[in-house]
Structure formats: C-alpha cells, structure tokens
Amino acid sequence: MTYTSFLVSEFLLIWRRKQDVINALLFFIIAVTLFPIGVSSSPEFLASAAGGIIWCAAVLAILMAVEGMFKEDFRDGSLEQWVVSGLSLPALILLKVVAQWLAFLLPLLGIMPLLSEMLFLPESSFWVLIMTFLLGTPSLFLIGVIGAALTVSLRQGAMLVMLLILPFYLPVIIFSTLAIQAAEANLPYSGQLALLSAMSLLSLVISPFMTAIAIKASAS
C-alpha cells in the first residue's frame, strides 16, 4: 500500500458510504432552513445573524461527520492494518481527514449561495464567509478526529465526542463570525482570517500525532 493508493481507497470508501456525508449535509441545510421559521424571518435580523447561523449549523454537521470517521475502520480491522503497514500513521490519518474534508466541504460550498440568499447575507460578506470556511473548517476536522479516535471503541460515543471537542471549536466560530461582521461593517477582517489560518496550521501539526496515539491505544 502506498499513500496514493490509500487516498484513492478513502475516496472510494466515502463514495460507498456517501449516506454519511449526505446525512451531515442534510442536517446542515435543515438547521439553517428552520432557524428563520423558529426565531425570526425579518430580513434585518437574518442579515446580521446569517454568518453565525451558518457557522453554528456547520459545526454541528461537522460533529456528525467526524464522530463515525473511524468506526467502520475499527470494526473491519483496518486500523490494525494501518498500524502495521509500515507507513506513517499520522500521514495516513491526515490523508483520511483531507478526503473527508473535501467530501464535506465541496458540496457545502455548492449550496452556500442559495442559503446565503435565503438568510439575506450581504453580498459584501459572502466571499468572507467562504474564506472563513476554507480557513476554519480544516481545524474543526483535525480537532474532531482526535475525539473520534479516543471514542472509536465505544458503542455510543457521539455525545462524548461532542462534549470533548466542542469547547475547542468555539474560537473558530468566534473569529469566523467576527470576520463576517467586520466585512458587513466595512472594517478590516484580515486579522481574524490570519487567526483562523494559525489555528488550522497548529491543528495540522498536533492533530495527526495525537490521533495516531489514540488509534494505537484503541487498536492494541
């Protein structure tokens, strides 16, 4: 097995198990759609809250996506094969995260214009919203897989994963919404984007190694 063949196999597995990605995306769409119905449909309110609504719904959808990321690999013995394959386990984990991130993010970006119009998000803020997703969601996936690896051997680990990693998601939500609000007010937002990039880079350095330790403990 090579890194390239592993990445290709991960995309094929995602295609076979596409219902998991579809469920997360449907949850995202439903959460965003129900918010105006349950809170307020006023254009003025929705325009100011659109960034926060979309980001909170995305975080919950990402939690759904990452919670079961290693479940099937644990059940069919793939995790043990990763450990003894002779390849770098952190690198394999990173490739799996990249595949899952792309499978989730690309469809999400495709429906983002429609949801933004529905929430009356100002045009000046739309591309800032896209940039926050591109810069912020990698850290959410990288942080999330640590919790997923820690609870992979548990039968009911979803709530535990949420409790473990949700506090670490808060800075990403805060700086993303601050950047969108700054764009709406015609204020500089490069600082918030830089912080999102820094958090993703820090997660990129730490997460694969911490996840590898948790997987080795679960697979042993």
Image: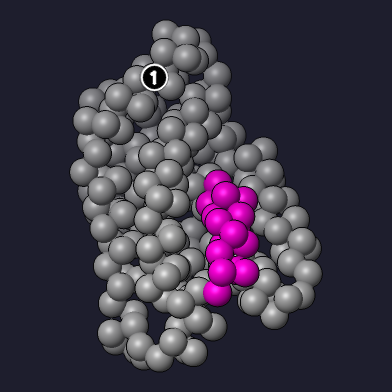
Could you tell me the amino acid type at mark 1? Val
The image quarter containing residue 28 is bottom left
Q: Which residue is at a point 55% across and 56% down the rendered structure image?
A: 130
Is residue 59 shown left or right of residue 34? right
The x and y percentages for residue 89 are 51, 23
The x and y percentages for residue 25 are 31, 54
The image quarter containing residue 9 is top left
Q: Which residue is at a point 49% across and 34% down the rendered structure image?
A: 98
For label 1, the residue is 8
In-front residue for pair 88/47: 47
Q: Is residue 9 above or below residue 52?
A: above
Q: Is residue 48 above or below residue 183?
A: below
The x and y percentages for residue 116 are 44, 68
Q: How many marks?
A: 1
- The magenta region covers 122-139
Q: Is residue 63 visible?
A: no
The coloring applied to the image is: one colour
In-front residue for pair 6/192: 192
Q: Which residue is at a point 30% across and 45% down the rendered structure image?
A: 21
Q: Is residue 204 visible?
A: yes
Dot 1 alpha-carbon crowd within 10 angstroms: few under 14, some 14 to 19, many 20 or more: some
Q: Quadrant of the C terminus?
A: top left
Q: Element under label 1?
A: helix
Q: Is residue 66 above or below residue 162?
A: above
Is residue 193 shown left or right of residue 141? right
In-front residue for pair 162/131: 131
Q: Is residue 212 magenta?
A: no
Q: Which residue is at a point 45% across and 39% down the rendered structure image?
A: 102
Q: Is residue 130 magenta?
A: yes
